Image (spheres, helix red, strand yellow):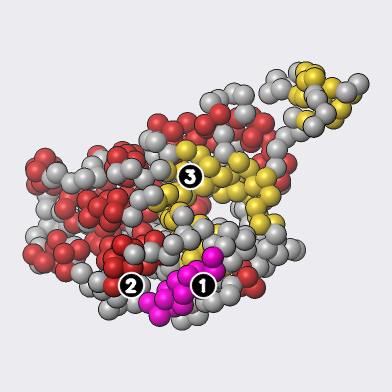
Amino acid sequence: MAKMSQTKELAVPTEDPDPLGKDPSEEPPSSRTALAKVLTVKEHLRRKKEYSGLIPLSEKSLRFLCDHYPQATPEDWSNWQWQLQNSICTADKLQNFLRLSYPEILAMSQSRAGLPLRITPYFASLLDREDAEQPMRRCVVPVSSEFVTCPGESPDPLGEDHQSPVPGLVHRYPDRVLFLTTGFCSTYCRYCTRSRMVGNTTKFRVSVKQWDQAIAYIDATPSVRDVLLSGGDPLTLMDSQLDYLLTRIKAIPHVEMVRIGTKVPAVLPQRITSKLLKTLKKHQPLWLSIHFTHPDELTPETSAACNQLADAGVPLGSQTVLLKGINDDVETMRRLFQGLLKIRVRPYYLYQCDPILGSGHFRTSVQRGIDMIQGLRGHTSGYAVPHYVVDAPGGGGKIPLLPEYYQGTQHGQIVLKNFEGRLFRYPDVQS
Ligand code: SF4
C-alpha cells in the first residue's frame, strides 16, 4: 500500500528521454554566465584550486581543457551537461584532437546510417593523439573495417528483437527482463551489441509512453523479479526521469531487484553528482553493472565516481567485452580486474564479443577467452576472476565457459586439473 501512494504523487516526465534535458539546475555553468574570456593556463590553475567538485579534475584533464576548450572553466568541465553538449560527434571536430589514420578517415568519409560517432571531451582527453592503435582509441573511433561483414555476423545476433513482447523490453529468461530505457549513450563503443539501434533516433526513439507500456508488461507478468535497465545508457537520463522509472518499477510488488547497466563512470564520471547519488540511494537495493574495457580507463576521475557510488551503498560489478588487440592478453586483464577491485568494483562478466555486423576486427577466438580465465584463476584473487560467457546467437542466453579443470572419473574418483596443470583426485560420493 505504501508503494501505491508513492506512485500516485509521482510527476510523469514532461519530456521524452532527452540527454540534453531541460532541467535548468543541470545546465552547464558557462551557458548561464555567458563566459567569453579565454583563460590563461595560470588562471585555469587558480580556478582549479578554487574548484571543489565531487569528481576531481586530474592534471591530464586540466591540460586538455586549457589546450582545447580555453573558454571553459573547471566548473564547466566537471558539469556532465557541458560534457554532453561539447562531445565530439564529427570527423572535423575529431581531427582537432587526433591525427586521424587512413582507415579512420575512410570510415568517417563514408555515409551510412550506422552507429554514430560520439565521444565526451573527458574520454577524448584519454586518447592518444598519434597512435591509432591505442586500445581506448580503437574502442570509440570508427575504422573502415566496420564496413566489412564476416560470415555469421548479423545486426541483431542475440535475437533481441524477436524476444520483445512490447517495444523496448526484452524478455528472454523466465524471471528477468531487459528494459531499454533510452537509445542514447554519452560515448559510442564501436563493438556495441546494440549498434543497430543506439544513437539511431530516427529508427529507435524511446518515449515516456513506451516506458509506460514496458512497466505495464512487467506489472502484468508476476514471474519477473529482476529488471535490468539498459539501453543506451540509463545514466544519461535526467535525474527526474530516472527517479520516475525507478519509482514506477519498484512499486511493482513482484519486482525484487533492479540493476542498471552503464558505461558512464568510465566515459562521463562527471555524471556522478550528489543529486544522482541521492536518487540512487532512495531506490535501494539497486545494483550497477559498469562496462569497463581497459585498465587505462581507471583514472582519478573514474576512481572517485566508483567510490562515491559505493559510499552511497550501490553494489558495483563490471562487465568487460573481450576485444582483439585491446584487452586480449592476461596481463592487461589482470591489471584491469585488480584495478577494479581497488575502486570497489567486482569483475562480474567477461563477454565474448557478439558477432554484430563489421565486428571481425574486434573478435578473438573463444579459446582466447578460455585462455584468459586460465591465466587468471589461481594466479590472482578469486574476486578478480569474472565469469567468461558467450551470449548464444539467436537468443540462447549467456553460456559460461571454463578451462577443462574437470578431467573425468577414474576408479570412482574425480580427476581434476589445478591452475598449475597438476592432476589431483577427489574421492567423490554417490548422490
Ligand atoms: S555504452 Fe553500452 S550501449 Fe552504449 S555504445 Fe557502449 S556498449 Fe553500446
Q: Are marks 2 and 1 in contact (CB under 8 Å)?
A: no
Classify residue 319 as left or right of residue 431: left
Question: Disc 1 marks which residue?
Answer: 220
Pinpoint residue 196: horizontal percent, then vertical percent: 56, 70
Q: Which secondary structure dominates the residues rendered in magenta? A: helix
Question: Of the numbered discs in the image, which one, if any, rests on residue 318?
Answer: 3
What's the residue type where badge 1 is placed? Ala
Q: Mark 3 falls on what kind of element?
A: strand
Is the residue 126 above or below the residue 194 in the image?
Answer: above
Question: Disc 2 marks which residue?
Answer: 18
Residue in the picture at 65% in, 52% down:
398
CA gap, disc 2 to disc 1?
28 Å
- Whether the magenta-drawn stretch holds residue 221 is answered as yes
Say if residue 362 shows up in the picture: yes
Is the residue 302 above or below the residue 95 in the image?
Answer: above
Nearer to me, 133 or 72: 72
Figure quadrant of the C terminus: top right
Q: Mark 2 falls on what kind of element?
A: loop
Residue range corresponding to the magenta coloring: 208-222
Residue in the picture at 23% in, 42% down:
56
Residue in the picture at 76% in, 24% down:
417
